[in-house]
Amino acid sequence: MAQSTQLREFTDDAFSQDVLQSDQAVLVDFWAPWCGPCRMVGPVIEEIADEFAGRAVVGKVNVDDNREIATQFQIQAIPSVLVFRGGEVVERIVGAQPKERYQQALEAAL
């Protein structure tokens, strides 16, 4: 399957602008390349990025490369998926979950 064109990469430097100041709901997948469950969730997050294109922002944060954000949002286990609305965390999902769980969380934030 082709890489999603909708999926964003969030970094420490731009997180505030890209996520906290977004006028759309934002789903953020906190992950790391060495994490097996993260690799299972990754393709699901890509599908959701395409499905919610234009309605919400969907992206990932590599916790190895962006420790500030991971610390700021107290990410202690990955994968962790946070849904933001208006700069606030409105949903926190820890561990690999079915696609429907992520879709429902994002839908609720729209």
Image (cartoon, rainbow, N blue to C red):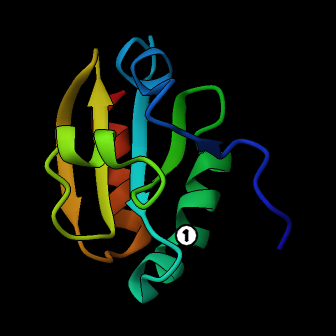
Q: Residues within 10 Å of mark 1 (few under 14, many from 20)?
A: some
Q: Farthest right residue?
A: 2
Q: Is residue 91 left or right of residue 59?
A: left
Residue occupying the point 31% across, 75% down: 97
Q: Amino acid at mark 1?
A: Gly
Would you say residue 46 is visible in this rendering? yes
Please tell me in which quadrant of the rendered image residue 110 appears: top left
Q: Is residue 34 left or right of residue 4?
A: left
Would you say residue 105 is visible in this rendering? no
Residue occupying the point 42% across, 55% down: 29
Give 80 or 33, whichever is nearer the viewer: 33
- Give the percent coordinates (x, y) of residue 33: 53, 75
Task: Using the image, determine if residue 49 lies above or below residue 35.
Answer: above
Task: Using the image, determine if residue 31 lies above or below residue 4.
Answer: below
Residue occupying the point 61% across, 47% down: 49
Give the number of marks: 1
Task: Using the image, determine if residue 74 lies above or below residue 18.
Answer: below
Q: Split into 4 quadrants, where in the image is the N terminus?
A: bottom right
SS type, badge 1 = helix
Residue occupying the point 51% across, 37% down: 11
- Give the percent coordinates (x, y) of residue 16: 39, 19
Q: Farthest bottom residue?
A: 36
- Give the percent coordinates (x, y) of residue 87: 27, 18
Please tell me in which quadrant of the rendered image residue 64 appears: bottom left
- Give the percent coordinates (x, y) of residue 38: 44, 76
Q: Residue under circle 1? A: 42
